[in-house]
Amino acid sequence: MIRLQGVTKQYQMGDQAVHALQGVDLHIRSNELVAFIGASGSGKSTMMNIVGCLDRPSSGAYWLNGREVATMSGDELALVRNQEIGFIFQSFHLLPRASALDNVAQPLIYRGIKLRERLALAEQALQRVGLGARMHHRPNELSGGQRQRVAIARALVGKPSILLADEPTGNLDSSTSLEILALIKEVHAGGQTVVMVTHEPEIAEQCQRVVRLRDGRIISDTMPGTPAPAAAGSAA
Amino acid sequence: MNLFLESVRSALASIRAHRLRSFLTSLGIIIGVASVITVISLIQGLSKSVSDQFTGLGGNGLTITAHNEYKDVMRGKINYLRFEDVEQLRVRTEGIRELSPMFNPGLSEVRFTGMSATAQVFATSASYQEVDQRYARLGRFISDSDDASARRVAVIGEKLIEDLHLPQNPVGQFIRYANEWFKIVGVMEKRGEIFGMSQDNYLIIPFKTGQSIIGNNTKPNLRISVAVRDLSRLEETRSRIRGVMRQAHRLKPEERDDFEIESADQLSKTFDSLSNTVTLVMGGVVGIALLVGGIGIMNIMLVSVKERTREIGICKAIGARSRDILLQFLIEAVTLSLLGGLIGLAIGYGLGVGIAAMIPDFPPAVVPWWAVVLSVVFSGSVGVVFGVVPASQAARLDPIDALRYE
């Protein structure tokens, strides 16, 4: 499903060349729940950007559902993001002037789906995350947890291959965090592949598989949630 | 198409979200379009009324006058129209409804009980009424018998009542002209003013009376007004008249016409070209106004792109392509400028009508359709031209940088 091979990423920060990723090999199968964990600067955000097709690797290959996406153009990547990836961000990243419903319907615009169908799909998605009653509220009228639910609905509305969550509980208090985490696990239980980026070990613990990054390399790839032998199959 | 509609929807939403700012942004366009539409509507109204007046002025027909080359005049060879020409035309030309000869007896001072005024005096026949489609408001016009017996009667224009302090109904009063007493038998309908000059300070006397004033030996400088039967065949009638006149004057084929045939609309054409020049100058002004307005829009759009960087990042992350973003911002700029143009159009029209109503005797304002089309097209294209830079800036943003932007 996701296969990274020898992926590196360098970029220029001032006069300094930063080697964010230094040869990463990774294979994620369908319906896995994977956490990338690492300190800041470990390269986990860069990983997330590349896996989410927001960025291209400097070298190496990336196959997503059998398609080589490492060499695609910006607009081709936009299409891939629209169809294959659902993003959840730490700071929600909702459109401030649009209602919850419109926010969730937004990705479908770029697929050319008609207004009525869009709204119907968005409504379904919002009901699925338990926000059916507050669809017409704007983000600033919703609590943090509710906003993140809207973001999850938006991520899921297009039925993506991967749900990509970047510190999804980073801006939430602990009880709301648990709710959101429970929701994500519920989505995973429904057959969704989920990749989560976090720096909190407690959150990573809840995942089947934990990929630990440091200095742009994978230092461990374990499966705490499943019996030990499966760990061997992780690296491609 | 779907995407286009979405962009319009989102543009309207974002304009609604910043009402005041959007208004101020398009203010440049609003003022530009409004001022131009105001001026154009006034000029066009004026021009319409002037050409209406000119059309009325000469009747719907032709005027024949003698044509004299300057060098011939210097040699003492002066061409005149003759009274027989009138008869020849009347009898021999098809397509003429009515003819009337007229001339100016030369003097222009008119007196009444110690008051004196300057008037355009002309001597003409009873048919003048029909030719020029202008009728007596009070009393009657000159009759054929007035003409036949060279009676000392006169029909006056409205303005002379005022200038000579005549009673409101001056019919039956005597006024003095060319050392003779003339009885006023009628007052003509009001013509109004052209460029502030009254067209009603005139005095009409019978043709023969005029002849007797200048003496039978003096040849009058005759003009013949012709009303044609069918206006759509004006040119045909004109060439017939030319043929008859050449025969009447016994001109050889190689000789040039010693007369001129003018149609009344030639005057209004002159005015049209004048008003076109003014309109053209206004076109230049609108260009500058729209340029300034466009820069205003570009400025705000650039700010707006900066402000909404994160939103752009979000949209890109969830699948917007560069061209989706480009279209969205471009349409927003076009919508702003188009709305400005439409508001300007409405304000300009209102101002034009208001100003025209406030100035006494000013003709009503007219907004021609081309001015509406032009202002919409121009303001729309200003949006495109000045929206491209901010929109492509937005489209080029890198999604990761845009998402991180604070």
Image (cartoon, rainbow, N blue to C red):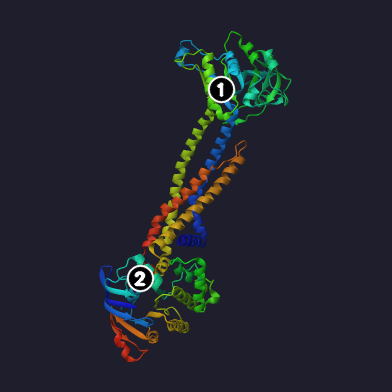
To which residue does mark 1 refer? Answer: B63
Q: Position of residue A236 (x, y in %)?
A: 28, 81
- The amino acid type, in three-letter code, at marker 1 is Thr
Decide which of B255, B56 is in the foreground and name it: B255
Residue A87 image position (x, y, % from top left): 41, 74
The residue drawn where x is 32% and y is 83% is A212
Circle 1 or circle 2, nearest the eye: 1
**Relative to residue B15, is residue A80 depicted above or below?**
below
| Drawn side of residue B391 relative to residue A43, left or right | right
Q: For this view, does B85 lie left or right of residue B74? A: right
| Residue displayed at 50% across by 69% down | A117
Q: Are marks 1 and 2 in contact (CB under 8 Å)?
A: no
Question: At numbered mark 2, what does the secondary structure look like: helix, strand or loop?
Answer: loop
Q: Quadrant of residue B353?
A: top right
Q: Residues within 10 Å of mark 1 (few under 14, many from 20)?
A: many
In which quadrant of the rendered view does residue A44 lie? Answer: bottom left
**Residue annotated with mark 2:** A54
Q: Is residue A99 visible?
A: no
Estimate how packed mark 2 is, as few (under 14), some (14 to 19) or many (20 or more) residues with alpha carbons within 10 Å. Answer: many
Residue type, label 2: Leu
Q: Is residue B8 above or below residue A183?
A: above
User: Where is residue A228 drawn, in percent x and y?
Assistant: 32, 91
The residue drawn where x is 42% and y is 67% is B315
Residue A175 - label:
none
Horizontal side of B322 relative to B178 (left or right) equals: left
